[in-house]
Amino acid sequence: MAADVPTYPVGLRLAGRKVLVVGGGHVAQRRIPTLIAAGADVHVVAREATMAIEGMSDEITLTIRDFEPADLDGAWYAIAATDNADTNAQVAAAAEERRIFCVRSDDASEATAWTPAVGRHDGLTVAVLANREPRRSAAVRDQIMEAMRSGTAIRSDSDTPRTPGVTLVGGGPGDPDLVTIAARNAILSADVVVADRLAPRELLADLAPDVELIDVAKLPRGRYASQEFINEVIVDRAKAGKRVVRFKGGDNFVFGRGYEEIQACNAAGVPVTIIPGLSSSISVPARAGIPVTHRGVTHEFTVISGHIPPGHPDSLVNWSAVAQMQGTVVLLMAVENGPAIAAALVAGGRPAETPVAVVMDGTMPDERVVLSTLGTLAADIAAEGVTPPAIIVIGEVVAVANPEHYGR
């Protein structure tokens, strides 16, 4: 087969059709998930398989033995992915006899099909073939995908119908680099963006000039947009035929009132989509080097809203029960009530020397961590000038991350 003859690009529709993969190593492990995602009837024949491939056994047909030409009977496509050139050649020859296109992982020049570097974005599939140079294919694919996601390439939704509705987007803990690709795509395709104060504001600079930006900030103990107003705005704009993104910090459903907005949309008959975000309750401690769990130290962690102090008639938290737990406690929105919460935990039986970390402006350039204990938290918050937004982490995991400070 002439090496300089160009390939003929085509998209295979493999749903319900048999595909044979010969080999159970890491090459096969990379190829099988995309075949499963395409709906293919995947058959794997291998002398041995990785644990990951064994874990797919409820989605594929896995046979542990040597390849036999009859394995190709009924197949539409084949991949020879063993570490033995002779076996791969046998697979390719048997596939050729049956007029089945076959990829060879070891020698593309002897294959009848090549696997492109593939990327998908907003309903588009990009496939790049660089003439048997897989690293170059992947590099070009990555550049194209980045350009599409960032909006520097032709907008992929420019010729597609703009379906009205509401998308709830979790913006993560604050660093714009920690926003998901799905979140960026939704923001770039929006007609209206309804944004919280803690949503990564740098991303708003990428909005087109005609996108309506509605500020619904909630300042601590200050000005705020009511939840009722937010519900009315997103429903009103969606019913006017707009694509609305409700953009907030953290995750929609971790003290983000996201489900209240879903209920409002459902009541109005407005379609709604959810794009989760990294919850600050986990990602902020992680970025600060504090694990919320650690083997042999804690078997649980609890996330609690601290916007209402212990003893308040509206509080739904059993602080006495929390005090009896041995695991990690993560407090959100708790700077003002942190001292009262610490006192309640100590009164409930948690030792006063329990380590505490307060992470301010988590994941942002001015992030700052104050190390304390339950017994000294009130004084340390005052002395260090702690202000929101901040995450308070309580438990031995703080000492695991900072052994010298706590003399461990």
Image (tube, helix red, strand yellow):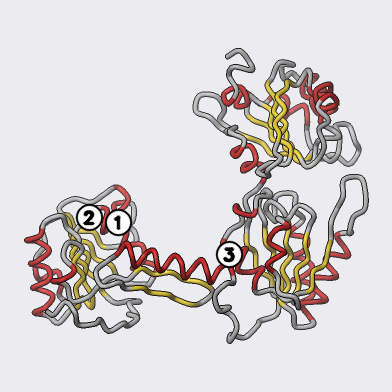
Residue that numbered label 3 is attached to: 182
Residue that numbered label 2 is attached to: 24
Q: Earlier in the sequence, mark 2 or mark 1?
A: 2
Number of on-image labels = 3
Viewer-side label of 1, 3:
3
Image: 206 above or below 46: below
For mark 3, does the 10 Å Cα neighbourhood hold few (<14), some (14 to 19), or many (20 or more) residues? some
Which picture quadrant has residue 281? Answer: top right
Residue that numbered label 1 is attached to: 29
Measure the alpha-carbon separation of dots 3 and 2. Answer: 32 Å
Asked if the residues shown at circle 2 and circle 1 are in contact, with their CB atoms under 8 angstroms apart, the answer is yes
Q: Amino acid at mark 2?
A: Gly
Left or right, residue 375 beside residue 13: right
Q: Amino acid at mark 1?
A: Gln
Which residue is found at the position 63% from the left and 58% from the top?
Answer: 276
Residue 32 horizontal/vertical position (percent): 31, 62
**Residue nearest the viewer, comparing 385 with 196:** 385
Image: 198 above or below 132: above
Residue 408 horizontal/vertical position (percent): 57, 14
